[in-house]
Amino acid sequence: MLEQERLRNQRWRLGMIRHAEEVTHNVAKTCRHFGVSRNAFYRWYRRYKQQGSDGLKDRSKRPLHSPRATRTEVIGKIMYLRQSYHFDPWKIHMYLLRYPDIKISSSGVWCILKHLGLSRLPSSQVTRGTKRVGRGMRRQPLGTGFKWTSSF
Protein backbone atom coordinates (compact mmCIF):
# COMPACT_ATOMS: atom_id res chain seq x y z
CA MET A 1 0.00 0.00 0.00
CA LEU A 2 1.38 3.39 -0.93
CA GLU A 3 1.94 6.14 1.60
CA GLN A 4 -0.69 8.30 -0.14
CA GLU A 5 -3.31 5.60 0.38
CA ARG A 6 -2.39 5.29 4.04
CA LEU A 7 -2.76 9.04 4.54
CA ARG A 8 -6.07 9.05 2.62
CA ASN A 9 -7.43 6.25 4.86
CA GLN A 10 -6.26 8.09 7.95
CA ARG A 11 -7.98 11.34 6.87
CA TRP A 12 -11.16 9.43 5.92
CA ARG A 13 -11.32 7.80 9.36
CA LEU A 14 -10.72 11.15 11.06
CA GLY A 15 -13.49 12.71 8.99
CA MET A 16 -15.84 9.88 9.96
CA ILE A 17 -15.09 10.39 13.67
CA ARG A 18 -15.61 14.14 13.38
CA HIS A 19 -18.86 13.55 11.49
CA ALA A 20 -20.12 11.39 14.35
CA GLU A 21 -19.04 13.89 17.01
CA GLU A 22 -20.12 17.16 15.37
CA VAL A 23 -22.83 16.46 12.79
CA THR A 24 -25.00 13.47 13.65
CA HIS A 25 -24.08 12.75 17.27
CA ASN A 26 -25.17 9.20 16.38
CA VAL A 27 -22.65 6.43 15.71
CA ALA A 28 -25.13 4.06 14.03
CA LYS A 29 -26.22 6.69 11.47
CA THR A 30 -22.63 7.69 10.78
CA CYS A 31 -21.56 4.08 10.25
CA ARG A 32 -24.52 3.49 7.93
CA HIS A 33 -23.68 6.67 6.00
CA PHE A 34 -19.99 5.74 5.58
CA GLY A 35 -20.64 2.01 5.07
CA VAL A 36 -18.56 0.61 7.95
CA SER A 37 -19.41 -1.57 10.90
CA ARG A 38 -19.80 -0.13 14.36
CA ASN A 39 -17.08 -2.49 15.61
CA ALA A 40 -14.59 -0.94 13.19
CA PHE A 41 -15.74 2.57 14.10
CA TYR A 42 -15.35 1.99 17.81
CA ARG A 43 -11.94 0.36 17.29
CA TRP A 44 -10.74 3.43 15.38
CA TYR A 45 -12.42 5.78 17.88
CA ARG A 46 -10.71 4.07 20.83
CA ARG A 47 -7.32 4.32 19.12
CA TYR A 48 -8.01 7.98 18.23
CA LYS A 49 -8.76 8.81 21.87
CA GLN A 50 -5.57 7.05 23.07
CA GLN A 51 -3.03 8.02 20.38
CA GLY A 52 -4.57 10.90 18.46
CA SER A 53 -4.57 10.95 14.68
CA ASP A 54 -1.58 8.56 14.58
CA GLY A 55 -3.84 5.84 15.96
CA LEU A 56 -5.92 5.97 12.77
CA LYS A 57 -3.08 4.75 10.55
CA ASP A 58 -3.33 1.32 8.96
CA ARG A 59 -1.64 -1.38 10.97
CA SER A 60 0.09 -4.50 9.77
CA LYS A 61 -2.04 -7.62 9.67
CA ARG A 62 1.02 -9.84 9.95
CA PRO A 63 0.96 -12.18 12.96
CA LEU A 64 3.41 -11.50 15.76
CA HIS A 65 4.60 -15.12 15.76
CA SER A 66 3.99 -18.22 13.65
CA PRO A 67 4.45 -21.33 15.79
CA ARG A 68 3.93 -23.74 12.86
CA ALA A 69 6.33 -22.01 10.48
CA THR A 70 9.07 -24.11 8.88
CA ARG A 71 12.31 -23.87 10.81
CA THR A 72 15.18 -21.93 9.24
CA GLU A 73 17.55 -24.92 9.27
CA VAL A 74 15.02 -26.95 7.24
CA ILE A 75 14.70 -24.09 4.75
CA GLY A 76 18.50 -23.97 4.56
CA LYS A 77 18.66 -27.69 3.77
CA ILE A 78 16.01 -27.30 1.07
CA MET A 79 17.93 -24.41 -0.49
CA TYR A 80 21.19 -26.37 -0.37
CA LEU A 81 19.69 -29.46 -2.01
CA ARG A 82 18.03 -27.40 -4.73
CA GLN A 83 21.07 -25.26 -5.57
CA SER A 84 23.74 -27.93 -5.23
CA TYR A 85 22.07 -31.04 -6.63
CA HIS A 86 19.09 -29.54 -8.54
CA PHE A 87 16.69 -31.94 -6.81
CA ASP A 88 12.98 -31.61 -7.53
CA PRO A 89 10.51 -31.17 -4.62
CA TRP A 90 9.71 -34.89 -4.44
CA LYS A 91 13.37 -35.87 -4.25
CA ILE A 92 14.04 -33.21 -1.60
CA HIS A 93 11.04 -34.52 0.38
CA MET A 94 12.37 -38.09 0.15
CA TYR A 95 15.86 -36.94 1.19
CA LEU A 96 14.50 -35.09 4.23
CA LEU A 97 12.55 -38.15 5.38
CA ARG A 98 15.87 -39.58 6.57
CA TYR A 99 15.91 -37.03 9.37
CA PRO A 100 13.54 -38.06 12.17
CA ASP A 101 12.79 -34.50 13.34
CA ILE A 102 11.89 -33.13 9.88
CA LYS A 103 8.41 -33.76 8.53
CA ILE A 104 7.57 -31.82 5.37
CA SER A 105 5.55 -32.79 2.32
CA SER A 106 6.65 -32.40 -1.26
CA SER A 107 4.02 -29.70 -1.76
CA GLY A 108 5.44 -27.89 1.28
CA VAL A 109 8.89 -28.09 -0.28
CA TRP A 110 7.44 -26.67 -3.51
CA CYS A 111 5.82 -23.76 -1.65
CA ILE A 112 9.12 -22.93 0.05
CA LEU A 113 11.01 -23.12 -3.25
CA LYS A 114 8.45 -20.88 -4.91
CA HIS A 115 8.63 -18.37 -2.04
CA LEU A 116 12.43 -18.28 -2.31
CA GLY A 117 12.33 -17.88 -6.09
CA LEU A 118 13.97 -21.27 -6.69
CA SER A 119 10.99 -22.95 -8.32
CA ARG A 120 12.53 -23.05 -11.79
CA LEU A 121 15.55 -25.21 -12.55
CA PRO A 122 18.24 -24.00 -14.94
CA SER A 123 17.47 -25.01 -18.53
CA SER A 124 20.43 -27.40 -18.55
CA GLN A 125 18.92 -29.35 -15.61
CA VAL A 126 15.34 -29.69 -16.83
CA THR A 127 14.44 -33.31 -17.53
CA ARG A 128 12.06 -34.11 -20.34
CA GLY A 129 9.34 -36.65 -19.68
CA THR A 130 8.89 -39.77 -21.76
CA LYS A 131 6.18 -39.97 -24.37
CA ARG A 132 2.97 -41.44 -23.01
CA VAL A 133 1.19 -44.33 -24.61
CA GLY A 134 -1.92 -42.80 -26.11
CA ARG A 135 -5.16 -44.38 -27.20
CA GLY A 136 -4.57 -46.76 -30.07
CA MET A 137 -0.81 -46.74 -29.63
CA ARG A 138 1.43 -49.61 -28.63
CA ARG A 139 5.08 -50.41 -28.29
CA GLN A 140 6.75 -52.45 -30.99
CA PRO A 141 10.27 -53.75 -30.56
CA LEU A 142 12.67 -52.46 -33.18
CA GLY A 143 16.17 -53.80 -32.66
CA THR A 144 17.62 -52.45 -29.40
CA GLY A 145 14.94 -49.94 -28.47
CA PHE A 146 11.25 -49.37 -28.76
CA LYS A 147 9.33 -47.37 -31.34
CA TRP A 148 5.93 -45.78 -30.90
CA THR A 149 3.52 -46.71 -33.63
CA SER A 150 -0.14 -46.14 -34.15
CA SER A 151 -2.53 -49.02 -34.65
CA PHE A 152 -4.83 -46.92 -36.86
Image (cartoon, rainbow, N blue to C red):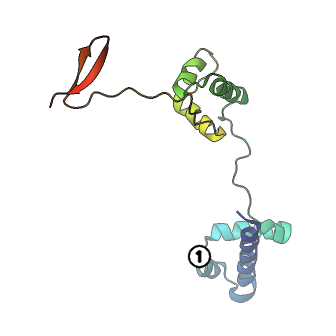
| Residue appearing at x 68%, y 36% in the figure | 67
Which quarter of the rendered picture does the C terminus lie within? top left
- Residue 7, image quadrant: bottom right
Disc 1 crowd rating (10 Å Cα; few below 14, some 14-19, many 20+) is few
Let me know if residue 105 appears in the view. no
Let me know if residue 114 appears in the view. yes
Amino acid at circle 1 = Gly
| In this view, 45 is above or below 94 | below
- Residue 75, image quadrant: top right
Q: Which x, y percent locates residue 102?
A: 63, 22
Secondary structure under tag 1 reads loop
Q: Which x, y percent locates residue 110?
A: 56, 34
| In this view, 7 is above or below 104 | below
Decide if residue 142 is on the left or right side of residue 24: left
- Reading the image, the residue beneath label 1 is 35
- Residue furthest toward the top? 144
| In this view, 114 is above or below 90 | below
Q: Which x, y percent locates residue 14?
A: 76, 76
Which quarter of the rendered picture does the N terminus lie within? bottom right
Decide if residue 128 is on the left or right side of residue 25: left
Could you say which is closer to the camera, residue 133 or residue 141? 141
